[in-house]
């Protein structure tokens, strides 16, 4: 299976018709539902549904328990998706912008602390 071996939920992905996942694909919860005391409510669906024959390319992120990716769809590389798409849909990032600043230019508003 190659690329599938490095993903944590290989059996789940294959069972749901995802035949061509690439490296760095993330699927997960958009948020965690909480009760009145702020505790996480367990047992609710948090991961997206990928219908049959969906291709998710490298470094794409698909989030949300109510998110459904329709069959025969393709999610492009580096896409961040938090809502459903219809079958036969292609989702991709268009015209990314690269900004390079030199050492003499101010870096206003940038905070590199983790």
Image (spheres, rainbow, N blue to C red):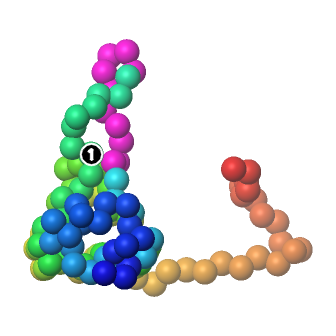
- Residue 58 drawn above or below residue 36: below
The mark tally for this picture is 1
Out of 94 and 71, give the one closest to the viewer.
71
Q: Is residue 11 left or right of residue 86?
A: right
Residue 37 visible somewhere in the drawing: yes
Dividing the picture into quadrants, the one containing residue 32 is top left
- The location of residue 58, given as percent across then percent down, is 41, 78
Position of 74 with respect to 34 (left or right) is: left
Does 30 lie within the magenta span?
yes
- Residues shaded magenta: 29-38
Asked if residue 81 is positioned above or below residue 77 in the image, the reply reads above
Which is the main secondary structure of the residues drawn in magenta?
loop
Q: Residue at x 42, y 70 (%)?
A: 6
Q: Secondary structure at mark 1?
A: loop
Check disc 1 and report the residue beneath it.
46
Q: Is residue 85 visible?
A: no
Q: Is residue 86 magenta?
A: no
Kindly identify the residue that appears in the image at 31 percent across and 21 percent down.
35
Res 78 → quadrant: bottom left
Query: Is 67 left or right of 62, judged from the image as shown?
Result: left
Q: Residue at x 20, y 70 (%)?
A: 14
In this rendering, the answer to whether 41 lies above or below 31 is: above
Taking the view exactly as shown, the residue that stands out farthest to the top is: 37
Judge by depth and name the residue closer to the eye, 37 or 93. 37
For mark 1, does the 10 Å Cα neighbourhood hold few (<14), some (14 to 19), or many (20 or more) residues? some
Q: Position of residue 59 (x, y in %)?
A: 44, 73
- Residue 74 image offset from top left, x and y in percent: 24, 79
Residue drawn 15% across the image and 72% down it? 17
Quadrant containing the N terminus is bottom left
Residue 101, image x, y percentages: 76, 76
Task: Quadrant for residue 88, please give it.
Answer: bottom left
């Amino acid at each position: 299976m190659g690329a599938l071996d490095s993903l944590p939920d290989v059996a789940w992905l294959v069972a749901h018709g995802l035949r061509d996942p690439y490296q760095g694909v993330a699927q997960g919860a958009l948020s965690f539902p909480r009760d009145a005391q702020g505790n996480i409510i367990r047992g609710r669906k948090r991961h997206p549904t990928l219908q049959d024959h969906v291709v998710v390319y490298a470094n794409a992120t698909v989030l949300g328990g109510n998110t459904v990716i329709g069959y025969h769809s393709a999610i492009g590389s580096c896409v961040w998706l938090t809502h459903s798409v219809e079958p036969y849909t292609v989702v991709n990032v268009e015209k990314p912008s690269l900004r390079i600043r030199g050492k003499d230019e101010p870096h206003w508003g940038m905070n590199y602390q983790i």
